[in-house]
Image (cartoon, coloured by chain):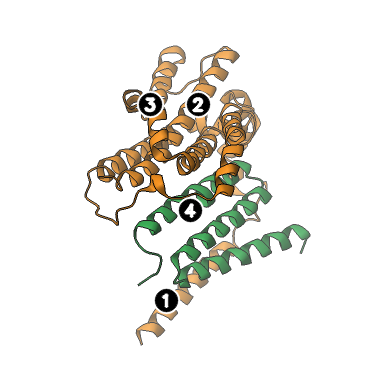
Chain colours: A green, B orange
């Protein structure tokens, strides 16, 4: 395995861990933060695979705007999953 | 029993998918089927024919302009839907006054300090999108995020006043409108929809115009989503 593959494998493991944690999380604010982490990891993967355009969109929309809108919704509904 | 059945189905499906994936050519291999048809043609002459040094932009705004037009219309339709639902006053959430929510002085100062730089970066991304990675949508999202940050610090009313209503009415639809105009101009000047007319400066002007329209449209859509969430608090 080349160092490039190791980097990809680490990011993919992080992505899977984040996804599983988001699904199991009862605290929704923490889930939103993990979702941002997931997006940033995915963004790193896009850059590494040579797609900077997609990476920029992922960082701005996935990690930025979506998190803000989710947080706003949480502030109006409730933080804990019933 | 049902769990065992579900597990069996999942294992069979996963096995089939893995068998399929193992037959794929390695990623990035030039012999792969996807790299031998239109993609090879795009890479050979795409920057020339598409009019943009950044190949991604050439594909998005020229070869697949109709796709991008569709995406722009989808974003606009989402904004229209949110405005139609959000401002009708159906929701009765807990009443709060976000204008008076305290913002930490650290956050306040950092947002005020960074705002001009973020704005400059967004504009740079929009205007240089046809040369460098990035482009109208990415720059527009950064601009929208900046306006949302500012409305946290300055209060949503100041942001609403920055965006005057009658102008906003048409500006929200700027991206689909400019795309439709470009399509018709291409048909009139060069013979087919979304064709870029000949002189190089005109091509570049049209591409920058499209990127600007996408950027402004995306930014206004995002701010619209946010402000209509805000608006519910006041009715």
How many angstroms separate mark 1 from mark 2 (CA)?
Answer: 49 Å
Quadrant of res B38: top right
Residue with the mark numbered 2 = B212
Badge nearest the viewer, 3 or 2: 3
Mark 3 falls within which chain? B
Crowding around mark 4 (Cα neighbors within 10 Å: few <14, some 14 to 19, many 20+) is some
Residue at the disc numbered 3: B171
Query: Which of the two labelled residues, at mark 1 and mark 2, occupies the earlier sequence position?
Result: 1
**Residue contact between numbered discs 1 and 3, judged by CB atoms under 8 Å:** no
Which of pointers 3 and 2 lies earlier in the amino acid sequence? 3
Q: Chain of mark 1?
A: B
Q: Is residue B41 found left or right of A25 in the rendered image?
A: right
The answer to whether residue B19 is visible is: no
Q: Residues within 10 Å of mark 3 (few under 14, many from 20)?
A: some
| B60 up-or-down from B101: above or below | above
Q: Position of residue B160 (x, y in %)?
A: 38, 33
Q: Quadrant of residue B173?
A: top left
Residue at coordinates 45% horizontally, 12% vertically from top-left?
B189
Q: Which residue is mark 4?
A: A67
Residue B9 shows which numbered tag? 1
Look at the picture and state if B202 lies above or below A19: above
Real-space Cα separation, disc 4 to disc 1, in angstroms: 35 Å
């Amino acid at each position: 395995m080349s160092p490039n593959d190791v980097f990809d494998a680490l990011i993919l493991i992080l992505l899977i861990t984040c996804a599983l944690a988001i699904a199991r999380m009862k605290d929704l604010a923490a889930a939103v933060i993990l979702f941002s982490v997931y997006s940033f990891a995915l963004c790193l993967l896009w850059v590494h695979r040579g797609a900077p355009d997609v990476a920029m969109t992922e960082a701005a929309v996935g990690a930025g705007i979506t998190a803000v809108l989710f947080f706003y919704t949480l502030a109006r509904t409730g933080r804990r999953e019933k | 029993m049902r769990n065992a059945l579900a597990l069996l189905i999942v294992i069979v499906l996963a096995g089939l998918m893995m068998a399929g994936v193992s037959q794929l050519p390695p990623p990035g291999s030039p012999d792969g089927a996807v790299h031998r048809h239109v993609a090879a043609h795009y890479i050979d002459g795409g920057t020339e024919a598409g009019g943009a040094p950044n190949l991604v932009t050439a594909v998005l705004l020229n070869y697949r302009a109709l796709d991008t037009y569709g995406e722009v219309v989808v974003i606009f339709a989402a904004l229209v839907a949110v405005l139609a639902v959000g401002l009708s006053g159906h929701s009765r959430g807990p009443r709060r006054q976000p204008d008076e929510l305290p913002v930490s002085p650290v956050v306040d100062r950092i947002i005020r300090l960074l705002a001009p730089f973020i704005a400059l970066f967004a504009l740079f991304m929009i205007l240089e999108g046809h040369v460098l990675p990035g482009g109208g949508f990415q720059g527009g999202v950064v601009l929208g995020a900046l306006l949302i940050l500012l409305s946290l610090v300055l209060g949503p009313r100041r942001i609403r006043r920055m965006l005057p209503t009658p102008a906003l009415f048409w500006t929200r639809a700027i991206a689909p409108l400019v795309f439709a105009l470009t399509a018709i101009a291409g048909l009139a000047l060069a013979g087919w929809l979304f064709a870029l007319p000949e002189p190089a400066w005109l091509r570049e002007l049209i591409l920058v115009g499209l990127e600007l329209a996408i950027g402004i449209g995306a930014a206004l859509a995002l701010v619209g989503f946010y402000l209509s969430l805000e608006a519910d608090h006041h009715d």
